[in-house]
Amino acid sequence: MTAPLLSLRAISKSYGQIHANQGIDLDVAPQSIHAVLGENGAGKSTLMKLIYGVEQPDDGTVVWEGEPLSLASPAEARRKGIGMVFQHFLLFDTLTVVENIQLVVPGRKADLMERIRTFGRDFGLEVDPLAHVHALSVGERQRVEIIRCLMIKPRLLILDEPTSVLPPQSVDKLFDTLRRLRDGGVSILFISHKLEEIRAICDRATILRGGRVTGHVDPREHNAHDLARMMIGRDMPEPMPALPQSGGEKRLEIIGLAYRPDDPFAVPLSNISLTVRAGEILGIAGISGNGQSELAALISGEAVLPREQRDRIYMMGKDVGTLDAAARRQLGFAFVPEDRLGRGAVPEMSLVLNSLLTAHPLGLLRHGLVDKAKAKAFTNECIRQYDVRTPGPDAEAGALSGGNLQKFIVGREIMLSPKLLFVAQPTWGVDVGAASAVRRRLVTLRNEGMAILVISEELEELFELCDSIQVLHHGTLSPPLVTRDTRPEEIGRYMIGAHPSRGKALA
């Protein structure tokens, strides 16, 4: 047998009382795509950080090409030929795309810009080299990370949820790229909660549960249901059906909204119209970077409308064009942003303090001071209800895995009992078991009469959740399509700007 490119033996890593990795054994063969599967908090991301030199193991041995390896930093890992794309992006918002890449990849700016454009064309990762990162959507930032990593020509490429915000077309192109890289001599460690992707791209999988290895399998020999059961140790529940609803009251209405942001790299919006009623889930589909961030900012109240457009957004029947985010929340609006670190939560603050960001009106303040007992009780209840894997309510938000932080933010907003809930990318980076639980909860809330707006780049998720779907393309919104009467291919044609020939639009 060919000697492994990378071997881990008895690797362990703890953070205080949290045992993230315990006695991990793992071999990555040359020219292979090796998956690491597990629930949120199973230890996947910690293990990848150990391989990449971000963290150092407490015990165990790392062997690289037959020689013991000790990495003190990611820079050392890159010099050895190990590259990594993180789930939470490591980009400077105030720099341009090419300036961010220059921090890692040597070369003249003009040459790097041309290489960025070439990678974009060849691999379906198009991005403007001169765009500032703060103006990019989450999906576009993902593209920058992948391009930057590929440009160092790695021997081992670690991908932590690389497709979580990519549209289906880009996923297919990325997989073609990964196969070409593998055939050209690159080994790939691949973390994803999308089990069909694992089966499509990976030739080996290591399964983690509770920080320990519970098995090594060939994912091509198992279906997604079997892999999910191996990961979570139990059968997956069936999706919850939506109950038929008659037309409820309008909780969100946007009428002919047009918006041109001051940022030259942002996407202008044109003639945006939508309605979300009580007892309904409306989904917004679209390829990342087509105006989702701009639309979310306008609905949430984070962006200011021009004076002539301030009569275009209504919540609970009230014109909210002049109301800020806090005033809209007072009407019964709640919001889960796509960027959980920085907008959904403050990473350096505890979960208790992060609860206060939006839940303080629920009696968590007394005479202007924090009621610590009630704030902690609220946080503990959120942790319990939404199975947030954390040492406790005083843990820093930034110390949680991405999926667990997402569960906490979604749970915090739902516990506000809003009349209108807006969720952007509800299950981004969330494992298959937790994603199923979040979706079931949203359907339950919809059945109980809540109005829910969902922006997601996962078509499968939108078809599972939504009563109707609209597609955002180049800042314009399609007519609403009844989900049960529409095929994914029709939504896909709208996503690339072509009008489908079939599909029943709502009157």
Image: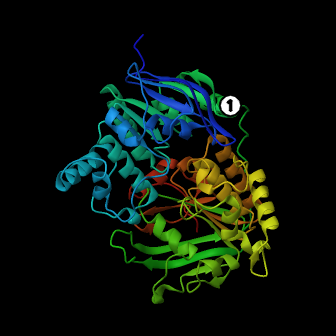
Q: Residues within 10 Å of mark 1 (few under 14, many from 20)?
A: some
Q: In the rendering, at what x and y percent does residue 26 appear?
A: 52, 24
**Residue at the image point whose x is 66% and y is 28% from the top:** 230
In the image, 289: left or right of 264? right
Q: Quadrant of residue 1?
A: top left
Q: In the rendering, at what x and y percent does residue 204 appear?
A: 50, 24
In the image, 452: left or right of 108? right
**Residue at the image point whose x is 38% and y is 49% from the top:** 145
Q: How is the image coloured?
A: rainbow
Residue 277 seen in this snapshot: no
Residue 6 seen in this snapshot: yes
Tell me: residue 63, above or below residue 502: above
Q: In the rendering, at what x and y percent does residue 408 appear?
A: 67, 56
**Residue at the image point whose x is 27% and y is 62% from the top:** 130
Judging depth in this view, the residue of 340 and 272 nearest the camera is 340
Tell me: residue 293, above or below residue 485: below
Q: Secondary structure at mark 1?
A: helix
Tell me: residue 127, above or below residue 14: below
Judging depth in this view, the residue of 66 and 264 nearest the camera is 66
Q: Quadrant of residue 31?
A: top left
View extreme (bottom): residue = 307
Q: In the rendering, at what x and y percent does residue 369 appear?
A: 75, 77
Quadrant of the image for the C terminus? bottom right
Tell me: residue 62, above or below residue 295: above
Residue picked out by circle 1: 229
Amino acid at pointer 1: Arg
How many discs mark residues in the rendered view?
1
**Residue at the image point whose x is 73% and y is 33% from the top:** 235
View extreme (top): residue = 1
